[in-house]
């Protein structure tokens, strides 16, 4: 048996430059991984066949379509091994949140299978398989902050000091009790045609790298407008947080989870949390976490 953690991500910067011929969108994103994570137990059972998944908190995720099951199946097929696998998925990360939970679970499953298997897949094969499972899967194979381009699958670690400075940064995640579908959000953006230009993206990245703008000024997400036009309560709470606390909230990925970077000297976390609960209700989801390496 192997137990692995599957960290969340947030998109500190997410620019969408246009729709591609293959239906995906061309994007450029800076992602940070978080200390909050799902955990996954994977058991190998020799002499049996089939993949079973248990997900105590979310029964509807107990299907063969779960990305972790898809990952296990792909690994077995590629290696030509045919033992049975039992998965137990302990979810901390709510699905349909833009935190990459499902993708991270899949990548952790691939890495666990490599530990359990008689022979391993190479790193190159794992990266290729991850990209086939989901656009943001390969980013979970890199350490530190990373840059994702293409449809999100072309990933590299960012090594400049503006990025290093963010390791250990405190983050408050907050999510209304609603999930958003990634394809829907991209489709809505496409309909409005509100894309960023490549020049603007490169200028912003350069300014952040050279520390001409702070991380707060750099934060950006093109998918917000596609979501906020329909769900007006996002803009309302963002304005309130900016005005009351001087902080800069953003949505992560295609939502619905949002985040705010919390400066070390900030002493009004309890007031911030109660503002969010008041606006979005007691069934909203709040978690304090930090950016990890
Ligand atoms: O790659 P993945 O299966 O995670 O993507 C889910 C969906 O999100 C895609 O089918 C597509 O509708 C949308 N998407 C997109 N452009 C991207 C990534 C995802 O349009 N770069």
Image: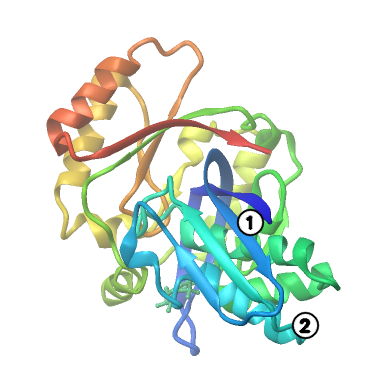
Tell me the quarter of the image containing the N terminus: bottom right
Lower sequence index among marks 1 and 2: 2
The residue lying toward the viewer, choosing from 228 and 267, is 267
Determine the residue positioned at 71% across, 61% down. Answer: 111
- Mark 2 lies on residue: 79
Q: Quadrant of ligand 1?
A: bottom left
* Residue, far front: 47
Residue 153 shown left or right of residue 269 in the figure: right
- Residue 125: where, in percent of width, then height? 78, 76
Q: Position of residue 237 (x, y in %)?
A: 20, 36
Which residue is label 1 attached to? 140
* Image-quadrant location for residue 23: bottom left
Q: Position of residue 211 (x, y in %)?
A: 64, 33
Query: Taking 158 as reference, is 276 above or below it?
Result: above
Residue sitting nearer the eye, 176 or 204: 176
Which structural element holds mark 1? helix
Instruction: Answer with left or right where residue 24 lies relative to residue 47.
Output: left
137 with respect to 227 (left or right)? right
Separation (CA) of disc 1 from disc 2: 22 Å
Counting from the top left corner in percent of width and height, residue 7 is at: 56, 47
Residue beneath the point at 29% across and 16% down:
270
Image quadrant occupied by the C terminus: top right
Q: Can the viewer see residue 73 in this picture?
A: yes
Identify the residue shown where x is 28% and y is 61%: 180
Is residue 210 at least partly visible in the picture? no
């Amino acid at each position: 048996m192997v137990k692995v953690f599957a960290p969340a991500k947030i998109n500190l910067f997410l620019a969408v430059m246009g729709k591609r011929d293959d239906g995906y969108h061309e994007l450029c994103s800076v992602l940070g991984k978080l200390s909050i994570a799902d955990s996954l137990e994977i058991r190998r059972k020799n002499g049996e066949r089939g993949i079973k998944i248990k997900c105590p908190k979310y029964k509807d995720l107990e299907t063969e379509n779960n990305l972790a099951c898809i990952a296990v199946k792909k690994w077995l097929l590629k290696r030509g091994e045919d033992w049975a696998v039992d998965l137990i998925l302990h979810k901390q990360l709510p699905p349909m949140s833009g935190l990459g939970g499902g993708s991270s679970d899949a990548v952790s499953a691939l890495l666990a299978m490599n530990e359990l298997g008689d022979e391993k897949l190479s790193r190159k094969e794992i990266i290729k398989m991850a990209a086939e499972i989901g656009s943001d899967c390969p980013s979970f194979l890199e350490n530190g902050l990373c840059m994702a381009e293409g449809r999100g699958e072309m990933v590299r670690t960012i090594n400049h000091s503006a990025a290093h400075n963010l390791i250990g940064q405190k983050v408050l995640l907050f999510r209304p009790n609603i999930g958003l579908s990634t394809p829907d959000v991209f489709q809505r953006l496409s309909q409005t045609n509100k894309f960023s230009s490549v020049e603007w993206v490169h200028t912003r990245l350069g300014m952040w790298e050279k520390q001409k703008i702070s991380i707060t000024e750099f934060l950006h997400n093109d998918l917000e407008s596609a979501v906020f036009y329909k769900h007006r309560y996002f803009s309302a709470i963002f304005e309130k947080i900016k005005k009351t606390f001087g902080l800069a909230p953003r949505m992560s990925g295609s939502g619905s989870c949002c985040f705010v970077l919390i400066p070390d000297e900030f002493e009004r976390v309890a007031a911030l949390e109660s503002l969010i609960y008041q606006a979005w209700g007691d069934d909203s989801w709040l978690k304090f976490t930090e950016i990890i390496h």
